[in-house]
Image (cartoon, grey):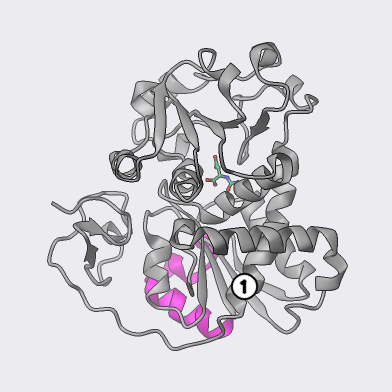
Amino acid sequence: MKHIIDLSDLTRGEIENLVKNAQEIIAHTDDYRDSCKGKVMASLFFEPSTRTCFSFQTAMMRLGGSVFGFSDPTLSSVSKGESLSDTVVMCSGYADVLVMRHPQEGAAKAASLYSDVSVINAGDGGHLHPTQTLTDITTMFHYRGSCDAMRIGLCGDLLNGRTVHSLIKTLSKFKDVTFYLISPPELRIPAYLRSFMMTNHMKFYETSSMESVIQLLDVLYMTRIQKERFSDILEYEKLKGVYILSKRKLRNAKKDMIIMHPLPRVDEITVDVDSDPRAVYFQQARLGMFARMALLLRQISFGREPFQVTESNTTHRCKNPKCILSKEKNLPLVESMGRCIYCDSELS
Ligand code: NCD
């Protein structure tokens, strides 16, 4: 798999190999300090980021490689009206790997059609966030030794939270995972993901009450309400603060449950939880750097190969207003099994 757009494109074996390599890097970090010497990573962040951007940059630095790019698109030629495909063609000529975050769903997939080197999706709108999932899986292996036979509570904005979408899709590869999807009715998982879970016979329960399931969980994965994805700010104001995990609410939770969060946190976990031994979210962020080191090593090993022109195979333009197709008019219109290949929405 030359590009990492969706972690669930990898086999379970490939994902476990990445986790094993991350563990090996944690144990012998110094041995890797020249592994990417002479290699260059392009860091194209069209949307704000702290953890993902910094952890990719430090991952590359710890491998001995170099980094260029932008974290504010208003300082790049994008602000002059350059298309995404032109930016990608040009940057892939300079770099050995492209790491890209973009506010539009499917943007990383679009970029991969124009790149001679591996593209890694660092988040595409509310769609997917595969390297956060690799971080999350590495964290579960680190603290619980496996992702099999886990009862996982996903809590918060399950509609717009791309980390949740990626995690659900990827954990379909593991055995006996049960999901407790905790959200207000307005923020339940998107329709495409619900049909993915049903088609793949995944076990899940939907509830709006954290208190009613917390005692069952091995992992509680908190997320923030994704303010920037709301078209109506009043709707956000109504839903913000709906879940707040406090020390008191943890009273009924298992002693070995772990509390994860992709961060940044707003107010969904009170600071008194930070000192609880079950709270692993800051360690999770650090583990993400090692997971990304393992991923960069793998993706750079694919080298450079000229991209093939992709032809349209449909005349249907995706109707999802958040899809990259609504912004970039020159992309090929491609569908796979009735879905838009960029954002996964149904085309009919
Ligand atoms: C997440 C993201 O950007 O989707 N953060 C991250 O990458 N660590 C979660 C979020 O922004 O809420």
Magenta-colored span: 72-95
**Residue drawn at 47 percent across, 88 percent down:** 305
| In the displayed structure image, the side of residue 97 where residue 162 appears, left or right | left
Determine the secondary structure under disc 1.
Answer: helix
Quadrant of residue 53 within the rendered picture: bottom right
Circle 1 sits on which residue? 298
Residue 331 lies, with reference to residue 325, above or below; the image says: below
Quadrant of residue 329 within the rendered picture: bottom left
Per the picture, the main secondary structure of the magenta-coloured stretch is helix
- Residue type at tag 1: Arg
**Residue drawn at 43 percent across, 24 percent down:** 183
Front residue of 204 and 270 = 204
Instruction: Give the total of numbered labels.
Output: 1
Front residue of 194 and 319 = 194
**Residue drawn at 66 percent across, 50 percent down:** 138
Front residue of 248 and 316 = 248
On the image, the x and y values in percent for residue 278 come to 73, 28
On the image, the x and y values in percent for residue 40 come to 66, 78
Residue 305 lies, with reference to residue 338, above or below; the image says: below
Task: Find out if the beta carbon at label 1 lies less than 8 Å from the nearest ligand 1 atom.
Answer: no
On the image, the x and y values in percent for residue 256 come to 72, 27
Asked if residue 141 shows in the view, the reply is yes
**Residue drawn at 72 percent across, 30 percent down:** 279
Asked if residue 57 shows in the view, the reply is no
On the image, the x and y values in percent for residue 275 come to 80, 25
